[in-house]
Amino acid sequence: MTWRTHMCGEPTAALVGERLTLSGWTARRRDHGGLVFVDLRDRSGVTQLVINPEHSPEAAELAHGIRNEFVLRAEGELVARSPETVNANMPTGEVELKVESLEIVSRSTALPFQLDEENVDETLRLRYRWLDLRRDKLQRNIGLRAQMVGIIRRTMEEAGFLDIQTPILFKPTPEGARDFVVPSRLQPGRFYALPQSPQILKQLTMVAGFDRYYQIAICFRDEDLRADRVQEITQLDVEMSFPDQELLFALMEEMFSRIWSECLGIEIPSPFPRMTFAEADRRYGSDKPDTRFELELEDATEATRGSEFGVFAGAEAVRFLRVPKAFSRGELAKLEELAKEWGAKGLAYLVFDGGEIRSPIAKFLSESELAAFAGADGETLLFAADAWPTTSRVLGALRLHLAGELGLIDESAFTFLWVEDFPMFERDDEESRWTAVHHPFTRPTDEWKNRFAEEPEPALAHAYDLIVNGNELGGGSF
């Protein structure tokens, strides 16, 4: 017995007249009283089965009892559909299998939800995970992931990197989250730690002379779940001896360009643009800026020194966004509440509307200050006046919020960006010590290598992140 001669997504007009055997799951059954049509599905696609009682009475009798998700094996001749029944939306839409022999391999109980049903409770989906994974979206996602991993492996191995698998049971290392620990049965009271990354282990491979290492590594981090934080992740992990930044950047750009091209059919121009952390923070209020739209932050600190508006005059930094909309008072009140959630004490504004300036602070601003702001009609300037990091956090978050609200983002675009020269340290006031901004396995940039211990705050690290559409896709250091 042959289970299948072809996958369900493979039959095309070139195979018309051949005898095929297909096996798969019932996606849909349509019983017309005489003829029964069944959409048979596997991970490759769907083929329509036609069961005619005049040609195969036994198969027709079975077909009347078929329900969704029954597993079937069907044999028959592949025939062309009549012109009026061709389905141009399906790769197999020009053909159908005229069934001569049908077997119900496995029956399904009543389904807790339909595979094409929207807004199914996530707990229910997880309880029936094997069923959830049959949905088209998840089938595509997992197939896409497998395709992406294949491209990564080919790219890395063509560049001379060796795939080395490192241990999962290890010891704690200084990373950015808490460790998951595993008690040792043979040594009571002692524990293994699951790796947050294979950092120490991959460095051992360099000491051992393997020179170029990579791994599709599973990493574990015991931290609170958020939209962009999970406790188990899979990452491409890379290490190299005698490192060359330009070589590594070019290799990553080649790899991501191949992934986007082969998986999505989108060509990504390279080399990717580069920007220092300081510039990203100054222009976008973020170390992972979304560069699909403009709306950059502007600095009014110098223009407001000596201002009669005390909030501006006394602030370490005064910065603003120039938004292409004249907001109403109600809209500004909502924006102020959002700004307060991100740490602002308030939200000053100037609205340029019909030749007038609407603002409670305008009367405190001099002619030179108003000239420096120079808003066009229909614009609103939103100000943050505080410590520099606070103005970045508040205006950076407002920038993203407003871009979504005002439709400024080109959703079809992918903008890649290298962000370099991160600060090496940040002050942890609770523990009264300096901690690593990126991670502790980072050397200072050349101009700081002999003096970062004396001046830790302004010292720069030889660290970088790769950003796409405001998301951190990866990062590393030398």
Image (cartoon, grey):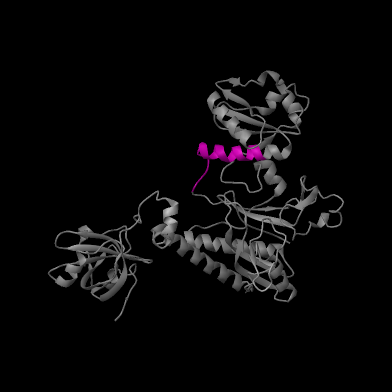
Question: Residue at 72% of width from left, 69% of height from top?
Answer: 203
Question: Along the horizontal axis of the image, is 256 left or right of 201?
Answer: left
**Residue 56 appears in the picture as rendered:** no
Question: Residue at 69% of width from left, 38% of height from top?
Answer: 390
In percent of width and height, residue 325 lies at: 54, 30
Q: Is residue 395 magenta?
A: yes
Question: Along the horizontal axis of the image, is 236 left or right of 112?
Answer: right
In percent of width and height, residue 326 lies at: 55, 27
Foreground residue among 316 and 289: 316
Q: From the viewer's perspective, is residue 418 above or below residue 219?
A: above
Q: Is residue 123 magenta?
A: no
Question: Residue at 67% of width from left, 57% of height from top?
Answer: 178
The tally of labels here is 0
Picture quadrant of residue 279: top right
Q: Which residues are magenta?
A: 393-411
Question: Along the horizontal axis of the image, is 148 left or right of 279?
Answer: left
In percent of width and height, residue 88 lies at: 29, 58
Foreground residue among 240 and 354: 240
Question: Along the horizontal axis of the image, is 314 left or right of 140?
Answer: right
**Residue 252 appears in the picture as rendered:** yes
In percent of width and height, residue 156 lies at: 60, 70
Residue reaching furthest to the left: 54
Quadrant location, the N terminus: bottom left
Picture quadrant of residue 53: bottom left
Foreground residue among 238 and 26: 26
